[in-house]
Amino acid sequence: MRIGFGSDIHGLVPDRPLIIGGVEIDSDLGAEGHSDADALTHAITDAILGALALGDIGTHFPPSDERWRNAESFVFLRFAVGEMKQHGYEIGNVDSTVHLESPKLRPYIDEIRKGLADALEVETNRVSVKAKTGEGIDVVGERRAVRAEAVVSLEFKL
């Protein structure tokens, strides 16, 4: 068994979509970044790569490479899943938290979990997505950023 941790943060700006876990969230602010800036998918990708000791998302998809401008982050996640399978592992479970002051993510959580489970090639009951606000404190609470953290367990396939 291996365990990985990933985290990501993106500033929030007008005139950009807010994508979380592959789902577009109805919001007046979106995440700024080289790709689609999906902080949750980036955190899960980093957690898988970290569990395999393969560096981080920037190692494989550097922001200096124009091929990845506005790329859908599930491309990165599917790459990490491929690496995981190539090394003989499968997802045990994913536990993640998205920190966003508003809008509330509860109406989107089931759709996010389903899409992530499909990309991770597991049942939805192996993917946990929680949402927290910043309670008006720090960059999240001031609506200046979205932050996500994820822990994954990988199990060696016998």
Image (cartoon, helix red, strand yellow):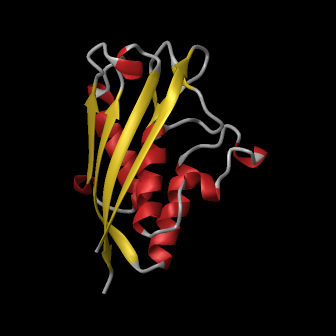
Residue 102 sits in quarter: top left
Q: Residue at x 30, y 13 (%)?
A: 136
Residue 131 lies, with reference to residue 72, above or below; the image says above
Left or right: residue 92 versus residue 76 is left
* Residue at the outermost front position: 138
Left or right: residue 141 versus residue 77 is left
* Residue at the outermost bottom position: 158
Q: Residue at x 27, y 53 (%)?
A: 124
The image shows residue 70 at horizontal and vertical percentages of: 67, 37
Residue 129 lies, with reference to residue 156, above or below; the image says above
The image shows residue 89 at horizontal and vertical percentages of: 38, 75
Q: Residue at x 63, y 39 (%)?
A: 35
Left or right: residue 91 versus residue 79 is left
Q: Quadrant of the C terminus?
A: bottom left
Q: Nearer the viewer, residue 137 or 119?
A: 137
Q: Quadrant of the N terminus?
A: bottom left
Q: Nearer the viewer, residue 41 or 11?
A: 11
* Total numbered labels placed on residues in the image: 0
* Residue at the outermost right position: 66
* Residue at the outermost left position: 125
The image shows residue 38 at horizontal and vertical percentages of: 50, 37
The image shows residue 111 at horizontal and vertical percentages of: 34, 38
